[in-house]
Image (cartoon, rainbow, N blue to C red):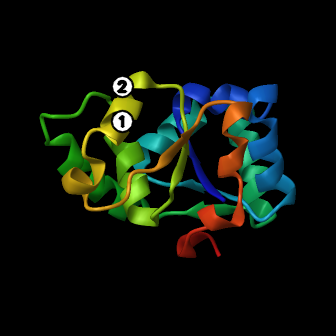
Amino acid sequence: MCLIVDANVLGEFFTNDDFSIACAWIREGKGKLVFGGTKYRAELARVGPALRVVGELNRIGKTVQLADSSVDAREAEIAARSDLESDDPHIIAMVQESGCCVVCTKDRALQKDFSKRFRQRFGIKKPSVYKDKRHRRLICPDNIVPACR
C-alpha cells in the first residue's frame, strides 16, 4: 500500500494505535509513504517528531518523493478551482501525481472533496480514506500503485 498522510494526522500517525497497522505496513511491509510539494514539506517541517521518522523511512527506502515542482504545478491548478471544500489542494495534487489510492486523514472537508465526483473533477479514481484501525482492509498489495513499486 502506498499512503499519503495528511498533516492533520501527521503528528499522531507514527504513535497512535489507530494508525499502528498502517505504520507497520510501511515500516516492515511493502508499503511506502508518498510525499512531495512545497506546502506539504512545510507542514512536515512543523511536526518535528514526524519529520525525523519520515527522514528515517526515507533512508531505508520506504518513501516515494514526488517532484516538488510537479506537485506545486498541479496544486496551483487545483487551488484555482472554486469548488473545493478543503484547504488541501496539495494533497489532491499528490494523489494525481502519484496515483496513490489511500490517504490517511481525518479532515472532513478533504473527505468531501474525495467524494464529490472525484474522477470527473480530477481525472483519476478517488482515493480511499484511512482514518483508524477499522480501515485495515486498505492495507493490502492491491493498493500498491506503480509509483511505489
Look at the numbered discs 1 and 2 and tell me whether their residues touch, using CB distance below 8 Å.
yes
Circle 1 residue: 88
Q: Is residue 21 above or below residue 60?
A: above
Q: Is residue 66 left or right of residue 117?
A: right
- Can the viewer see residue 147? yes
Single out the mark in the foreground, 1 or 2. Answer: 2
Quadrant placement of the N terminus: bottom right
Residue 96 drawn at (x, y percent): 37, 59
At mark 1, the secondary structure is loop
Label 2 sits on what residue type? Ala
Residue at which label 2 appears = 109
Whole-angstrom CA distance, mark 1 to mark 2, is 9 Å
Q: Position of residue 80 (x, y in %)?
A: 14, 42
How many numbered marks are there? Answer: 2
**x and y percentages locating residue 34 in the rendered image:** 58, 56
Residue 142 occupies quadrant: bottom right
> Which residue is painted at 78% across and 62% down in the image?
59
Q: Amino acid at mark 1?
A: Asp
Residue depicted at 46% across the width and 25% down the height: 107
